[in-house]
Amino acid sequence: MTEQKKSLNFIEQIIEEDLKNDYKKEDLKFRFPPEPNGYLHIGHASSINLNFGLGLKYNAPVNLRFDDTNPIKEEQEYVDSIKRDVEWLGFKWEKECYASDYFQQLYDWAVKFIKDGNAYVDSQTSDEIAQQKGTPTEPGKESPYRNRSVEENLELFAAMKNGETKEKAHVLRAKIDMAAGNMLMRDPVMYRTLHQTHHRTKDAWKIYPMYDWAHGESDFIESISHSFCTLEFLPHRELYNWFLEKIKEPGDFLPKQREFARRNLSHTVVSKRKLAQLVEKNIVESWDDPRMPTISGLRRRGYTPQSIRKFAESIGVGKRENMIDMAHLEFCAREDLNKTAPRVMGVLNPLKVVITNYEQEEEWLEAENNPEDESAGSRKLPFSKEIYIEQEDFREEANRKFFRLKLGKEVRLKNAYIIKANDCVKDDDGNVIEVHCTYDPKSKSGSDFEEAKRKVKGTLHWVSIKHALPVQINNYDRLFNVEDPTADKEKEYLEFVNPDSLNVTTGYVEPSLQNAKVLDRFQFQRIGYFCVDKKSSAEKLVFNKTVGLRDSWAKKK
């Protein structure tokens, strides 16, 4: 029992403590409340994993609720992408909800606030309101409209709702305390006037609730037991509770807000506003660009849902913000793909090899699909007189530690034969463009000869030139060339964009990939993991490099 308690994160400890006190297990209900103003990123994946994970742990419902209170920035495209991402990660929600579902109820409660003397219409500009807020050490000043009569407030608020007042002419503010130590309690704005078309309610409303007003009340309407949000919302908790206290009736169950720390990811940004700028400025091609830390970008790059969930679980839930190295996310991807990705052969920087004593037209060799998964079976691989190997796998001369192909020495071709380099052909600049080898026909992979354990240290991947498929390879580097692009407050974060974050080349792969489908993932042996991109066609396959076989980035630091 002691070990189990130690393994609980602080969020789970809060829930367990509540269950010991006044909560019942059937009271538990969670929610994931994204704003549909952009695509979800890796930070949201942690929140998704937390909320839906709690639902699974406690067998409790979890709602997907869209905080769609800002028609200026929100679009149906973002709603669709969020639903797609949550489903792809493997989670199911109890109900699909929208803050806009509650606009009428929120309005009715606001009217009650006015009648009870807890809200008023302020006709000042936003700058004037900001100036009167005061500072953390100095109290604010009351608005000259703070003591409007209930009748005048009701009349103006109704006019705002009906679109009879100019945009930005008025706001509705809660009447709390302009001298409060928490500046959020200094008469916060509850509604603003916006003559904008909403993606769901169209033109039915001319006023829209602010986040602090809509959020807690939406939790209350849905009977959410625990409302988890990131640490920047800690000062908002007092206001969250104040609003709920004003609308509750005796015996009502109130949700509880608690905060956890945001996890930042190195060499990128996890802010929808900043990610939107990357798209708008054409630094990346789209929200799902494989360099982006968005869930859709990671999916397109080849990450699996299991690897992202494993990442979220491994970094845990904490009370302090910290920076997670991108290499850790890549490790999670590599660990999962190693178990599931079929092995294939591809050559990215080709060097022609001619096997001078190979007399056959071609032959088809047996190759296992995944040594980590016996059920994956095997495939046939074509072999012929002319093959490609990687340029870096040949040297004319090399020391003993070079176990690849060099003149006068032998290597094994994976799933094929042992070959020996005899000479090479160079271009006018002295670059090797062709290597001439001989092969040992008795050294076929899987033969009795091989079982005799002839010692050849090097094993190379290769493709038959006659059968090879030319493909586009998208190689990715970090999107930013510093760990934290936002750390230097004197510089714009865009100054740290890595100009070499994408390198496009042509490679050659074995013919078994001819029928590969978009999002199919493979291990190119000895190179890394690759995923078929959505821009692939019958005429041209495009592969995105997901991650290398090992952490090559650490070598660059």
Image: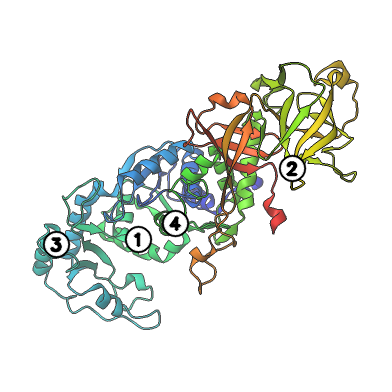
Residue of label 1: 240
Estimate how packed mark 2 is, as few (under 14), some (14 to 19) or many (20 or more) residues with alpha carbons within 10 Å: few
Q: For the residues marked 4 and 1, what is the alpha-carbon distance in whole angstroms?
A: 33 Å
Q: Which label's residue is closer to the chain start, 4 or 2? A: 4
**Nearest the camera: 228 or 368?**
368
Mark nearest the camera among 4 and 1 is 4
Q: Residue 161: percent from the left, percent from the top? A: 14, 58
Give the residue type at disc 1. Tyr
Element under label 4?
A: helix
Give the residue type at disc 3. Met
Image-quadrant location for residue 304: top right
Estimate how packed mark 4 is, as few (under 14), some (14 to 19) or many (20 or more) residues with alpha carbons within 10 Å: some
Q: For the residues marked 4 and 2, what is the alpha-carbon distance in whole angstroms?
A: 43 Å
Element under label 1?
A: helix
Estimate how packed mark 3 is, as few (under 14), some (14 to 19) or many (20 or more) residues with alpha carbons within 10 Å: many
Q: For the residues marked 4 and 3, what is the alpha-carbon distance in whole angstroms?
A: 36 Å
Q: Check if mark 1's residue and mark 3's residue have beta carbons within 8 Å.
A: no
Mark nearest the camera among 4 and 3 is 4
Mark nearest the camera among 1 and 3 is 3
Residue of label 2: 427
Q: Which label's residue is closer to the chain start, 4 or 3? A: 3
Residue of label 4: 278
Q: The C terminus lies in which quarter of the figure?
A: bottom right
Q: Which label's residue is closer to the chain start, 3 or 2? A: 3
Q: For the residues marked 2 and 1, what is the alpha-carbon distance in whole angstroms?
A: 74 Å
Q: Which mark is residue 160?
A: 3
Instruction: Tell me: 99 left or right of 262.
Output: left
Q: Which label's residue is closer to the chain start, 4 or 1? A: 1
**Nearest the camera: 489 or 94?**
489
Element under label 3?
A: helix
Instruction: Tell me: 548 left or right of 225.
Output: right
